């Protein structure tokens, strides 16, 4: 499903679900101005088309004991397709890595890491990340304070 295939009602559905993914189908249908059965069909089509990828609760990390957020810029020894894929797959095995992007420029990957404290993060970087067979360089950035957090897309 491509954006060109989305009509005004689909866009309204997406906007409303981004605001509140827990609302009932009846409430959603009222907000977008259609009856419940076609609303549910549209939502299912958006899910099946991969436009809606899931529904999640937004958690407060520090209140749960995860006080440190850091970013790691990782350069690989060799940028072959096999090495890039292998490292990307490996990131899925590391619970501290919450998000990962393959990037171009000085680094090959940008990892967002969330840890309980600095010691846990340092242990991960030294014992796990830098010891990975594909890794050549690691540059880390500790965050001071998050100033903006938007999960929603402007559509």
Image (cartoon, rainbow, N blue to C red):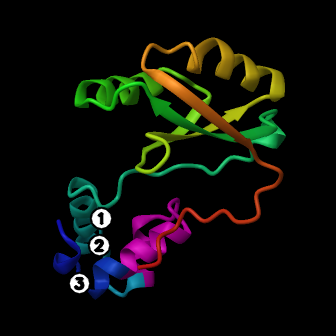
Q: CA distance from mark 3 to mark 1?
A: 13 Å
Asked whether, in this view, residue 111 is left or right of residue 9, the answer is: right
- The answer to whether marks 1 and 2 mark residues whose Cβ atoms lie closer than 8 Å is yes
Q: Residue 152 versus residue 100: which sits nearer the camera?
A: 100
Secondary structure beneath label 2: helix
Residue displayed at 47% across by 71% down: 153
**Residue 28 belongs to magenta span:** yes
Q: Residue 86 versus residue 80: which sits nearer the camera?
A: 80
Secondary structure beneath label 3: loop
What residue does disc 2 label?
39
What residue does disc 1 label?
43
Q: Identify the mark at residue 127; answer none if there is no mark.
A: none
Q: Name which quarter of the figure residue 25 lies in.
A: bottom left
Q: Name which quarter of the figure residue 78 lies in.
A: top left
Secondary structure beneath label 1: helix
Other residues around mark 3 within 10 Å, as few (<14) / some (14–19) / many (≥20): few
**Residue 24 belongs to magenta span:** yes
Q: Position of residue 116 (x, y in %)?
A: 78, 28
Residue displayed at 68% across by 36% down: 114
Residue displayed at 43% across by 40% down: 108
Residue 130, compared with residue 17, is above or below; it is above
Q: CA distance from mark 3 to mark 2?
A: 13 Å
Q: Is residue 27 visible?
A: no
Residue 98, compared with residue 52, is above or below; it is above
Asked whether, in this view, residue 84 is left or right of residue 64, the answer is: left
What residue does disc 3 label?
7
Q: CA distance from mark 1 to mark 2?
A: 6 Å
Residue displayed at 55% across by 71% down: 19
- The answer to whether marks 3 and 2 mark residues whose Cβ atoms lie closer than 8 Å is no
Q: Is residue 63 visible?
A: yes
Read off the magenta span: 12-31
Prevalent SS, magenta region:
helix
């Amino acid at each position: 499903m491509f954006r060109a295939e989305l009509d005004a009602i689909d866009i309204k559905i997406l906007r409303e679900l981004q605001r509140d993914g827990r609302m009932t189908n009846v409430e959603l249908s009222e907000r977008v101005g259609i009856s419940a059965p076609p609303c549910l069909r549209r939502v299912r089509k958006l899910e099946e088309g991969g436009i809606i990828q899931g529904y999640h609760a937004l958690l407060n990390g520090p209140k749960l004991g995860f006080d440190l957020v850091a970013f790691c810029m990782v350069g690989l020894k060799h940028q072959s397709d096999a090495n890039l894929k292998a490292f990307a797959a490996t990131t899925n095995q590391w619970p501290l890595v919450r998000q990962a992007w393959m990037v171009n420029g000085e680094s090959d990957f940008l990892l967002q890491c969330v840890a309980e404290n600095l010691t846990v993060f340092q242990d991960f970087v030294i014992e796990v990340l830098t010891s990975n067979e594909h890794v050549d360089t690691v540059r880390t950035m500790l965050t001071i304070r998050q100033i903006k957090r938007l999960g929603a897309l402007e559509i």
